[in-house]
Amino acid sequence: MTEKKSKKLITLDGNTLMAQEFEPLRFSVEKILPHGLFILAGSPKIGKSWLSLDLCQAVATGGQLWEYSANQGDVLYLALEDNYPRLQNRLNQMETENLDISRLHMATASFGLQNGLLEQIHDFVADNPETNFIVIDTLEHIRNGEQTSNLYACDYRDMNRLREITNKHSLTLVLIHHTRKMYDPDPLNTISGSTGLIGAVDGVFVLDKSKRTGNDAKLIIANRDTESFCFNLHFNKEICRWEFVGNDADDDEEDSFITILDDFLKDDWNGTATELCDELKKHDSNFNLTPAILVKKLNASNSLFKKDYGIVFERDRNKKTKRIFLRRTGQ
């Protein structure tokens, strides 16, 4: 009986890793929704489907969600708890008649996760290679695998299957899911299922109403690769859309950072993140970000800086230093 040879681990040393060039983070909706696997959760009938449909039409038309620009591409919306007459009625209520939504593709039925759904999605992307955004409404509707007593293992298994889609294709996949009927000061803890769900995805959006019958809600966003957000929203019943009301206090810090950087940058500048933090602190005593958070904000706001402020941000990595390059576009 021959023994199986063990495969050696493939590793990268720190210097080699830091010298690698990787593609910058890509977004379906700038700043708040990058490519990857995400959960949008909320209690039943709270308005998750309205929000997800608004996201879909924004990407399909290259429009906006509130103040955030969407990157146009084909969209697949699996509305597995709806039918076509209801979808048509919803789009009419959202006043999309003057929009070209030909790139929004909808289906009301699909196979399950364990018996063909992945193949269906791969085939769709092959037929529509500019697919940028997929919504599955709802997650529970496609879960048909064997459920064991180990809920964490089942949740992690299903998320890993779905991650095969975002590993193979450069796109955003959003799973609509429910929250539990319980109070917790952290809304992320109310997501139905085990921590295996949250641990396996790239970000979580929670739509949370303080009053069940009210029209006001908070959208809490916790992503791995971008900053976190907490938006105050109001549901406009006339056009069935969640409207942006404002940000919580932590967004004042974001506005302050952009203002300070814009005022500081008179000419082209380059240096390390630590050096930039020191310069910004000298320029304005209100600046208080660490180098790591500074780089994260620069990455997340790269498109915004270029579009609205004429600031181009680039990074140069070699084995010895990691330098930041900032320049004005002249616009």
Image (tube, helix red, strand yellow):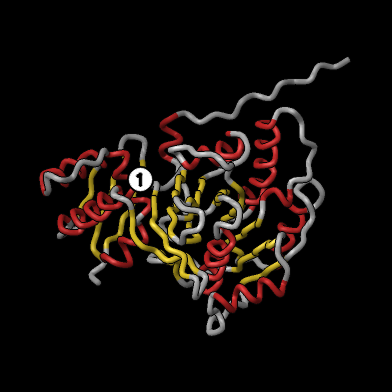
- Can residue 223 be seen by looking at this rendering? yes
Q: Is residue 246 above or below residue 221?
A: below
Residue at x 70%, y 35% (from the top left corner) = 154
Task: Report crowding for label 1: few under 14, some 14 to 19, many 20 or more residues within 10 A (C-alpha).
Answer: some
Q: Nearer the viewer, residue 33 or 250?
A: 250
Residue at x 76%, y 58% (from the top left corner) = 120
Residue at x 56%, y 56% (from the top left corner) = 172
Q: Is residue 65 left or right of residue 78?
A: left
**Residue 264 x/y as whole percent:** 15, 55
**Residue 308 x/y as whole percent:** 29, 67
**Residue 250 x/y as whole percent:** 30, 48
Residue at x 75%, y 20% (from the top left corner) = 5
Q: Is residue 256 left or right of residue 193?
A: left
Q: Nearer the viewer, residue 32 or 108?
A: 108
| Quadrant of the drawing holding the N terminus | top right
Q: How many marks?
A: 1
Quarter of the figure with residue 150: top right
